[in-house]
Amino acid sequence: MRPHVCFLTAALLLAPALQAQQLVYPETPRLPVVDDYHGVLVPDPYRWLEDLDGEQTRRWIEAQNALTLAYLDSIPQRDWIRQRLTELWNYPRYDLPQKEGGRYFFFKNDGLQNQSVLYVQEGREGTPRVLIDPNTFSEDGTVALTTLAISRDGRYVVYGLSEAGSDWRTFRIRDVETGEDFPETLRWIKFSGATWAPDHSGFFYSRYPEPTGDTLAAANRNQQLYFHRLGTDQSEDVLIYERPDDPELGFGAEVTHDGRYLIINVWKGTDTRNRVYYKDLSRPDGPVVRLLDDFDASYEFVGNTGTTFYFLTNLDAPNGRLIAIDITRPERASWRTLIPESEAVLQSVTLAGGRFVVRALEDVKARLTVHALDGTPLDTIALPAIGSVSGVSGRPDDPELFFSFTSFIYPTTIFRHDLETGTTEVFHAPEIDFDASRYEVRQVFYRSKDGTRVPMFLVHRKGIARDGSHPVYLYGYGGFNISLTPSFNPSNLVWLELGGIYAVANLRGGGEYGEAWHRAGMLENKQNVFDDFIAAAEYLIREGYTSPKRLAIGGASNGGLLTGAVLTQRPELFGAVIVQVGVLDMLRYHRFTIGWAWVPEYGSPDNPEHFRFLYAYSPLHNVRLHRCYPPTLIMTADHDDRVVPAHSYKFAATLQRAQGCANPILLRVETRAGHGGGIPTQKRIEMEADKWAFLVRALGISFEAGTNTNGR
């Protein structure tokens, strides 16, 4: 390896070539690194790019960013896109309020604030005041408030801070009345919330041992559950539970509303199955009881009335059912089903006002119903359009319920519902500079390669002709039981105003049709996800919405794996590809940070059977020399400690070397940002502007900067 390769010089001498899209990529040394996987020799010549903070890696990133910036700067429409995004983002946004101790707590963003601000309000008629403004924690807005736990008396809040998009959290405690913080700071917290003790003397939370080595790349194991007492140092925290015999177990804690029990959710990686333990808090020295320890299904604690615990589970019910377990008679023969499985997928159940409020999906569209504690249906809460109920907030002893509703062209709106009277009213509704009446949302269904019926949402201007001329941005995810339901994103409005069609395919691997749908797209079935996405593209072309040269695809994280995989399998099908924070090296993903936790979803390359199907689709290992790949923009961030950026670095280097035509392969590395959470508004606007500008050029979208195809 040559330690002083001048990457930057090669990247900057490009102005004439940029116009013709003849790019000169930074030199990327290849080393003779080869791994033996069960007798198969697999080269890994760019292994050195896994040294994220190495000097040579940093110089290579600078050169790649210089090349990408020069290319994007040459797109004349980019400034207009950025300006229009700024206009569309500039509207007040609210999150669901939480009510504790007679106080309402909620997040609000005035529009272009980098981070949303936490407000508190005394009663419904009180005047909101700022409680925590994370914008004051850093000059560049890269410190985000990501965790919040409010004591039941509304007196204290635990809040978590993330720096530069990292999954690591630092916890602080604030007195709501005085606005002052307690002196202690809690560290090394990841994948954990907080839950207050019934006497408000402190809270339960989970943390990892202080890592050794690279804190953004080292594996995270041996999570432990602690109790922190207010006003004490973290070193004095009391260990509640740990499992050194199984270091991959993680723990989430929740104190029941009556304050009697500590519920411990025991998870292992991203497996949807979990265990549930509990501790009787009236017995300080009492044991942790393993209530559900078979690891046979998912069990989501909903609430309790005395010794009766309510769980949403998919045990013997892939679409979910609500059950009741009396912990004095915990044997399965005594369990009761309150809400049975149906064709609708149960997403969540909230115990509010002495009732169950059930959020469900029917063909990926939201339904919100109210049930008695014995499961009897009582009411259906009317929703304003086809869309998603993205959250529900309520208390077991209070009939006041809040829920948020959103859709592709319906900005997230907060509603207040009275469970006693059955009335619903708007609590917070945003106003945005966009004429939604010119657009429509449609749901279509198509057949995948094996005949499976797959749904897809299309958003576009009303009355479009199916002449194959429209630019399409097809988005997908397909994994981890996550459902892509209709949601509002101001960035997508720019695409619509440019005359584009926004398409969302509900691929197998997600949770849109329950656990069976999820399992049909995981492990050895992962190719189904890619086939579903390819079939979506073929449907859009066949039905006259677009043509290959006008069809772009995008996805992030597991969705980045999706776009990376179909890029290597069917490059001729797409006019452009966006790969964001993607999992792209399926043979080494499990070696970094929390990657080991994805083994239940993807499989392990250490297993010979798993290696075969992972190697068959791993994007990094299926790039072929001298093949013509479509224009591709690979986007990542230097502080992504969930999907480490080495995935993107190695994939970009491999594609650039292999590219058999003049189509650009660009890498964009955001600094002081992570996997996606907590990204400052300004950075998000810049990222989205670059994405749309890249697609404008790649797909040949013509418009005069300063106007758009909508006639604004």
Image (tube, rainbow, N blue to C red):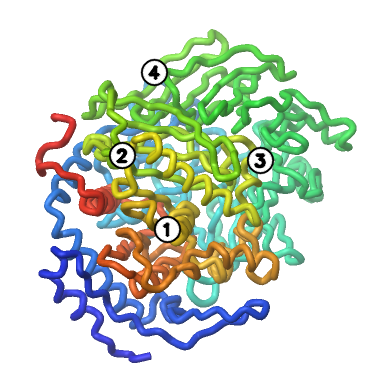
| 551 over 560 or under it: above or below | above
The mark nearer the N terminus, 1 or 2, is 2
The mark nearer the N terminus, 3 or 4, is 4
Q: Which mark is residue 426?
A: 4
The mark nearer the N terminus, 3 or 1, is 3
Label 4 crowd (10 A; few <14 / some 14-19 / many >=20): few
The mark nearer the N terminus, 2 or 4, is 4
- The quarter of the image holding the C terminus is top left
Look at label 1 and name its amino acid. Answer: Leu
The answer to whether marks 1 and 2 mark residues whose Cβ atoms lie closer than 8 Å is: no
Residue 451 falls in image quadrant: top right
| 616 over 523 or under it: above or below | below
Mark 2 and mark 4: Cα distance apart in space: 25 Å
Element type at mark 3: helix
* Total numbered labels placed on residues in the image: 4
The mark nearer the N terminus, 4 or 1, is 4
Viewer-proximal residue, 345 or 420?
A: 345
Look at label 2 and name its amino acid. Answer: Asn
**On the image, numbered disc 3 is attached to which residue?**
515
Element type at mark 2: helix
Mark 3 and mark 4: Cα distance apart in space: 34 Å
Label 3 crowd (10 A; few <14 / some 14-19 / many >=20): many
Label 2 crowd (10 A; few <14 / some 14-19 / many >=20): many
User: Residue 406's x, y, as percent?
Assistant: 41, 29
**On the image, numbered disc 2 is attached to which residue?**
492
